[in-house]
Image (cartoon, rainbow, N blue to C red):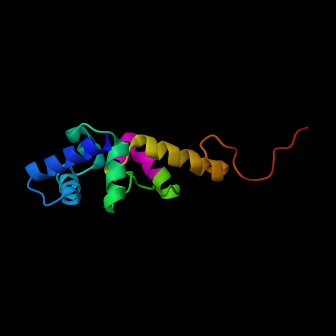
Amino acid sequence: MTESLKTRWEELAEAGGYENEQEFWKGEYRKAGSMKKLERSLGISNFTVRKKFYQFGIPCSKRGGPRNVKVVFDEVLLKRISTNGLAKTAKELNVAQYTLITARKKFFEKHPELKPGAPAPGPPPTTL
């Protein structure tokens, strides 16, 4: 089975005008733009692509893509969301709304006193 796979890749490399199998994988990856697109165009699994990249020492891009961003949530961003709304702020920052929701949740876990509806800081009320 390995021999038939190797023959297939060598044939594809030759048909594509590549010098060898390694150049085939590099060139096709460059053309496809991502591993997922390469898998689809060749009709193979992620494992096969990763195995070939490892075999030929081809570096692959990190996972996450362009939308893998970290949001620093602070009081300024909290005020911006309360003024402009969550959807508009997310669009302006080019992040998903869920990213802001998650960041806001973590922020309030660290600063519960800033959560809307939280009791104001100060001495506790006295009871008679």
Residue at left offset 61%, top offset 50%? 114
Give the residues in magenta: 79-91
Residue 118 as seen in the image, left or right of residue 90: right
Residue 53: which quarter of the image?
bottom left
Residue at left offset 45%, top offset 45%? 99
Residue at left offset 25%, top offset 41%? 4
Residue 4 lies in the magenta stretch: no
* Residue 118 rendering spot, x and y as whole percentages: 66, 43
Front residue of this view, candidates 22 and 62: 22
Residue 43: which quarter of the image?
top left
* Residue 89 rendering spot, x and y as whole percentages: 37, 47
* Residue 98 rendering spot, x and y as whole percentages: 44, 41
Q: Main secondary structure of the magenta part?
A: helix
Please say if 71 is above or below 104.
below
* Residue 51 rendering spot, x and y as whole percentages: 36, 51
Residue 26: which quarter of the image?
bottom left
Quadrant of the snapshot with the N terminus: top left
Front residue of this view, candidates 89 and 12: 12
